[in-house]
Image (tube, rainbow, N blue to C red):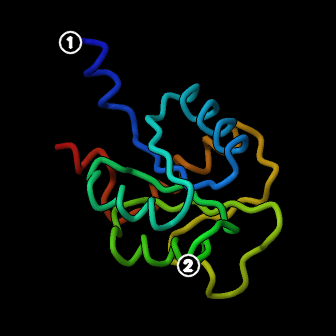
Protein backbone atom coordinates (compact mmCIF):
# COMPACT_ATOMS: atom_id res chain seq x y z
CA UNK A 1 0.00 0.00 0.00
CA UNK A 2 1.76 3.10 -1.21
CA UNK A 3 0.25 5.71 1.17
CA UNK A 4 0.93 3.57 4.23
CA UNK A 5 4.55 3.02 3.23
CA UNK A 6 5.04 6.79 2.86
CA UNK A 7 3.69 7.42 6.37
CA UNK A 8 5.95 4.76 7.86
CA UNK A 9 8.99 6.59 6.49
CA UNK A 10 8.09 9.82 8.31
CA UNK A 11 10.03 10.48 11.54
CA UNK A 12 8.07 9.60 14.68
CA UNK A 13 7.83 12.29 17.38
CA UNK A 14 6.81 11.47 20.94
CA UNK A 15 5.04 14.64 22.12
CA UNK A 16 4.80 14.97 25.92
CA UNK A 17 2.46 17.83 26.83
CA UNK A 18 -0.20 17.94 29.54
CA UNK A 19 -2.18 20.94 28.22
CA UNK A 20 -4.70 19.56 25.67
CA UNK A 21 -4.98 22.73 23.55
CA UNK A 22 -1.21 23.21 23.40
CA UNK A 23 -0.77 19.53 22.51
CA UNK A 24 -3.42 19.76 19.77
CA UNK A 25 -1.70 22.82 18.25
CA UNK A 26 1.70 21.11 18.32
CA UNK A 27 0.26 17.95 16.76
CA UNK A 28 -1.16 20.03 13.90
CA UNK A 29 2.19 21.76 13.33
CA UNK A 30 4.12 18.49 13.39
CA UNK A 31 1.73 16.63 11.11
CA UNK A 32 1.80 19.52 8.66
CA UNK A 33 5.60 19.12 8.63
CA UNK A 34 5.13 15.41 7.85
CA UNK A 35 6.07 13.99 11.24
CA UNK A 36 4.17 11.03 12.64
CA UNK A 37 3.08 12.03 16.18
CA UNK A 38 2.57 9.84 19.24
CA UNK A 39 1.09 11.70 22.23
CA UNK A 40 1.57 11.43 26.00
CA UNK A 41 0.31 13.73 28.73
CA UNK A 42 3.06 12.98 31.27
CA UNK A 43 6.43 11.26 31.64
CA UNK A 44 4.95 8.00 32.95
CA UNK A 45 2.80 7.58 29.84
CA UNK A 46 5.73 8.63 27.65
CA UNK A 47 8.04 5.99 29.16
CA UNK A 48 5.49 3.28 28.36
CA UNK A 49 5.39 4.47 24.75
CA UNK A 50 9.20 4.54 24.51
CA UNK A 51 9.33 0.94 25.77
CA UNK A 52 6.88 -0.29 23.13
CA UNK A 53 7.67 1.98 20.14
CA UNK A 54 11.22 1.48 18.83
CA UNK A 55 10.34 3.72 15.87
CA UNK A 56 10.39 6.94 17.94
CA UNK A 57 13.04 9.27 16.48
CA UNK A 58 12.70 12.28 18.77
CA UNK A 59 10.99 13.36 22.00
CA UNK A 60 9.42 16.80 22.35
CA UNK A 61 8.65 17.47 26.00
CA UNK A 62 7.36 20.35 28.04
CA UNK A 63 9.13 21.08 31.35
CA UNK A 64 6.14 21.62 33.63
CA UNK A 65 3.86 18.59 33.70
CA UNK A 66 2.05 16.48 36.26
CA UNK A 67 3.57 13.34 37.66
CA UNK A 68 6.65 12.32 39.54
CA UNK A 69 9.24 14.07 37.33
CA UNK A 70 9.51 17.23 35.25
CA UNK A 71 10.58 17.55 31.62
CA UNK A 72 14.25 18.11 32.46
CA UNK A 73 14.48 14.87 34.45
CA UNK A 74 12.48 13.07 31.77
CA UNK A 75 14.90 14.34 29.10
CA UNK A 76 17.92 13.10 31.09
CA UNK A 77 16.32 9.67 31.53
CA UNK A 78 15.43 9.46 27.82
CA UNK A 79 19.02 10.27 26.88
CA UNK A 80 20.27 7.64 29.33
CA UNK A 81 17.86 4.86 28.30
CA UNK A 82 17.37 5.71 24.62
CA UNK A 83 20.54 7.48 23.43
CA UNK A 84 19.49 7.16 19.78
CA UNK A 85 16.35 9.27 20.38
CA UNK A 86 16.64 13.03 19.89
CA UNK A 87 15.48 15.29 22.73
CA UNK A 88 13.86 18.72 22.49
CA UNK A 89 12.69 20.40 25.71
CA UNK A 90 10.36 23.41 25.64
CA UNK A 91 8.92 25.73 28.27
CA UNK A 92 7.22 29.08 28.55
CA UNK A 93 7.98 29.40 32.26
CA UNK A 94 11.26 27.68 33.12
CA UNK A 95 14.69 28.08 31.54
CA UNK A 96 17.30 25.36 32.03
CA UNK A 97 19.98 25.77 34.65
CA UNK A 98 23.42 24.21 34.21
CA UNK A 99 23.02 20.42 34.32
CA UNK A 100 19.27 20.45 33.58
CA UNK A 101 19.64 19.31 29.98
CA UNK A 102 21.32 16.07 28.95
CA UNK A 103 24.12 16.14 26.35
CA UNK A 104 22.95 16.89 22.80
CA UNK A 105 19.48 18.01 23.93
CA UNK A 106 17.95 21.24 22.66
CA UNK A 107 15.86 23.78 24.58
CA UNK A 108 13.38 26.29 23.14
CA UNK A 109 11.43 28.95 25.03
CA UNK A 110 7.69 29.21 24.27
CA UNK A 111 6.04 30.64 22.28
CA UNK A 112 7.70 28.92 19.34
CA UNK A 113 7.09 29.66 15.69
CA UNK A 114 6.12 26.51 13.74
CA UNK A 115 9.18 26.67 11.46
CA UNK A 116 11.48 27.01 14.48
CA UNK A 117 9.86 24.00 16.15
CA UNK A 118 10.31 21.84 13.06
CA UNK A 119 13.92 23.00 12.61
CA UNK A 120 14.73 22.27 16.27
CA UNK A 121 13.22 18.77 16.03
CA UNK A 122 15.24 18.06 12.91
CA UNK A 123 18.38 19.31 14.67
CA UNK A 124 17.62 17.19 17.77
CA UNK A 125 17.32 14.06 15.61
CA UNK A 126 20.64 14.84 13.92
CA UNK A 127 22.39 15.29 17.29
CA UNK A 128 21.93 11.66 18.34
CA UNK A 129 24.67 9.02 18.17
CA UNK A 130 22.64 6.92 15.73
CA UNK A 131 20.33 8.54 13.16
CA UNK A 132 16.77 7.32 12.61
CA UNK A 133 17.70 6.46 9.02
CA UNK A 134 20.29 3.95 10.28
CA UNK A 135 17.70 2.37 12.59
CA UNK A 136 15.33 1.73 9.70
CA UNK A 137 18.00 -0.11 7.69
Q: Residue at x 16, y 43 (%)?
A: 137
Left/right of residue 56 with respect to residue 41 in the rendered view: left
129 in relation to 122, above or below: below
**For discs 2 and 1, the disc positioned in front in the rendered view:** 2
C-alpha gap between disc 2 and disc 1: 42 Å
State if disc 1 and disc 2 touch (CB < 8 Å). no
Disc 2 crowd, CA 10 A, few/some/many (<14, 14-19, 20+): few
Where does the N terminus fall, quadrant-wise?
top left
Where does label 2 land, which residue? 68
The front one of 100 and 26 is 26
Q: Is residue 75 above or below residue 48?
A: below
* Left or right: 60, with 3 as reference point: right
Kind of element beneath mark 1:
loop
Name the residue nearer the viewer: 39 or 13. 39
Kindly identify the residue that appears in the image at 39 percent across and 65 percent down. 47
| SS type, badge 2 | loop
> Which residue has dot 1 on it?
1
Q: Between disc 2 and disc 1, whose residue precedes?
A: 1
**x 65%, y 37%: residue:** 24
Q: Residue 64 in the image: state x and y as whole percent.
A: 70, 68
- Residue lying at the far bottom of the rendered structure: 99
- Is residue 43 positioned above or below 53 on the image? below
Mark 1 is surrounded, within 10 Å at the Cα level, by few (under 14), some (14 to 19) or many (20 or more) other residues, namely: few
- For image coordinates 49% across by 56% down, the residue present is 59
Within the image, what quadrant is residue 2 found in? top left
Of 3 and 104, the residue lying toward us: 3
The reply, left or right, for residue 11 in relation to residue 124 is left
Amino acid sequence: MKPHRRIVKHPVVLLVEDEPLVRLTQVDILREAEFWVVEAQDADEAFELLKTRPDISVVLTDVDMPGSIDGFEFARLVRQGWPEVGVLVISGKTAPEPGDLPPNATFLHKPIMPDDLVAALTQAMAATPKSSVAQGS
